Image: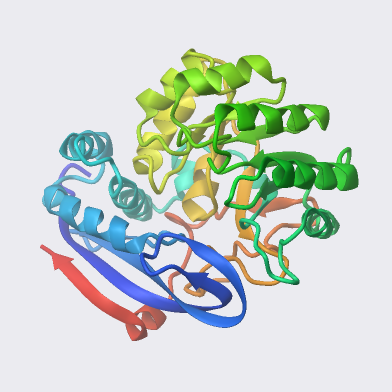
């Protein structure tokens, strides 16, 4: 352990093809587009040590052009470092990115955890002390669309909630339309609640599309009326205004959930301390990996608050398994007429975040195999590689 050193990092940008889902030209957003096939960009990282261990990670979501560039820049600074000193690495990389945000740290950190745990021959969950190997999941939708058979009406959302219930989900989260229309969003919440309330916990994520604090308050009153489980990222403050979200927290009974757009645990903790959010929100891909997310979860626990983990993927499962104060695993982004864009065709062992990844009780499973516990199809990735960067 003392003599372990990082010797090489490989970054691979590659392309996958998905049916009925298009990615925008910047690789940041997606949309449902029936009867079309779209090219989507992803990337993977491999970290090699001097004893032959290889840490691997492929972030399930898009934004690869941005995140891979940041990861490449930071990778030069981890050469010759001992991966077991991951907190020192995390702190160094945060210092390097203090002027430009902290994207890129998470991917490196997760791959380091994979490497360490393969070296120790244990799963990340076991390494973190995780006892829970079954995690209850909620179905989380794509944004609304205007397609005939899509999520194009309040009734379509209610139908999809019913479908998810029949599959075994006991919680359902709506992402509405991106134009932030108060009446349309309110009608969607009402339709879903009237259909499944009492059988499913219901969450609403405005994704910061409602234009004003007043709009957010108006929709929040609908959330109160139907006893929603949480109200997420209510309006166009970007999910970062302590004062604005504190006002909503004071005016509404529905718990507010913000923090998804903050890249460090200190600011997210400030949101809790100042009453701006009922929960904290951590994302291993974007919030400093498992190291940064674990810090936020522990800080939240110390304040008596829950920490909800954002999005799906093997790293998220391992992290949640070790947390006392986390309630659900998010299976996102789901749609009634296409596969999940975040469940990639790159696994050789059957790992999946498709809509049917849950068991009959609505739970997902945490792997007990070493590291992340997934087997990536690097032959497939090689065939679809756009370019590779080697840092040594």
The residue at the far bottom in this view is 383
Whole-percent x, y for residue 269 in the image: 43, 21
Please say if 253 is above or below 161.
Answer: above
Q: Is residue 360 above or below residue 326?
A: below
* Left or right: 316, with 224 as reference point: left
Write the residue at 53% across / 40% down. 208
Q: Residue at x 58, y 39 (%)?
A: 210
Name the one closer to the observer, 356 or 212: 212
Image coordinates for residue 372, horizontal then vertical, percent: 45, 55
The number of numbered badges drawn on the structure is 0
Quarter of the image where one finds residue 278: top right
User: Residue drawn 65% across and 33% down?
Assistant: 231
**Camera-nearest residue between 289 and 24:** 24
Can residue 44 be seen?
A: yes
The quadrant of the picture occupied by the N terminus is: top left
Picture coordinates of residue 331, whole percent (x, y): 62, 54
Q: Is residue 5 in view from this perspective?
A: no
Position of 62 relative to 250 (above/below): below
From the top left corner, tell me how far across and down residue 330 is, in percent. 61, 48
The quadrant of the image that shows the C terminus is: bottom left
């Amino acid at each position: 352990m003392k003599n372990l050193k990082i010797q090489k990092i490989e970054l691979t940008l590659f392309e996958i093809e998905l049916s009925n889902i298009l990615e925008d030209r910047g690789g940041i957003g997606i949309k449902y587009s029936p009867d079309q096939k779209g090219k989507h960009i992803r990337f993977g990282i491999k970290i090699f040590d001097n004893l032959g261990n290889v840490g691997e990670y492929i972030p399930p979501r898009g934004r690869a052009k941005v995140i891979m560039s940041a990861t490449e820049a930071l990778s030069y600074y981890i050469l010759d470092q001992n991966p077991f000193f991951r907190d020192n690495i995390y702190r160094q990389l945060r210092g390097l990115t203090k002027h430009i945000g902290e994207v890129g740290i998470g991917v490196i950190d997760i791959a380091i955890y994979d490497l360490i745990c393969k070296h120790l021959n244990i799963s990340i969950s076991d390494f973190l002390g995780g006892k829970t190997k079954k995690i209850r999941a909620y179905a989380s939708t794509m944004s609304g669309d205007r397609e005939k058979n899509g999520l194009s009406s309040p009734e379509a959302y209610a139908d999809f909630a019913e479908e998810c219930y029949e599959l075994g989900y006991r919680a359902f989260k709506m992402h509405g339309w991106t134009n932030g229309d108060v009446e349309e969003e309110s009608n969607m919440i009402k339709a879903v609640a009237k259909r499944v309330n009492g059988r499913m916990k219901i969450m609403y994520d405005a994704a910061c599309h409602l234009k004003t604090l007043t709009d957010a308050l108006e929709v929040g009153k609908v959330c109160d009326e139907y006893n929603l489980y949480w109200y997420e990222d209510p309006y166009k403050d970007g999910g970062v205004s302590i004062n604005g979200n504190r006002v909503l927290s004071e005016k509404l009974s529905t718990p507010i959930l913000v923090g998804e757009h903050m890249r460090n645990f200190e600011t997210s903790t400030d949101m809790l301390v100042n009453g701006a959010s009922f929960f904290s929100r951590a994302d291993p891909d974007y919030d400093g990996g498992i190291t940064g997310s674990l810090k936020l979860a522990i800080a939240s626990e110390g304040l008596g608050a829950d920490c909800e983990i954002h999005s799906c993927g093997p790293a998220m499962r391992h992290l949640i398994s070790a947390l006392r104060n986390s309630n659900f695993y998010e299976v996102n982004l789901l749609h009634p007429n296409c596969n999940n864009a975040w469940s990639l065709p790159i696994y050789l062992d059957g790992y999946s975040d498709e809509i049917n990844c849950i068991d009959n009780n609505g739970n997902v499973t945490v792997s007990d195999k070493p590291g992340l516990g997934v087997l990536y199809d690097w032959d497939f990735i090689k065939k679809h590689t756009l370019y590779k960067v080697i840092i040594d």
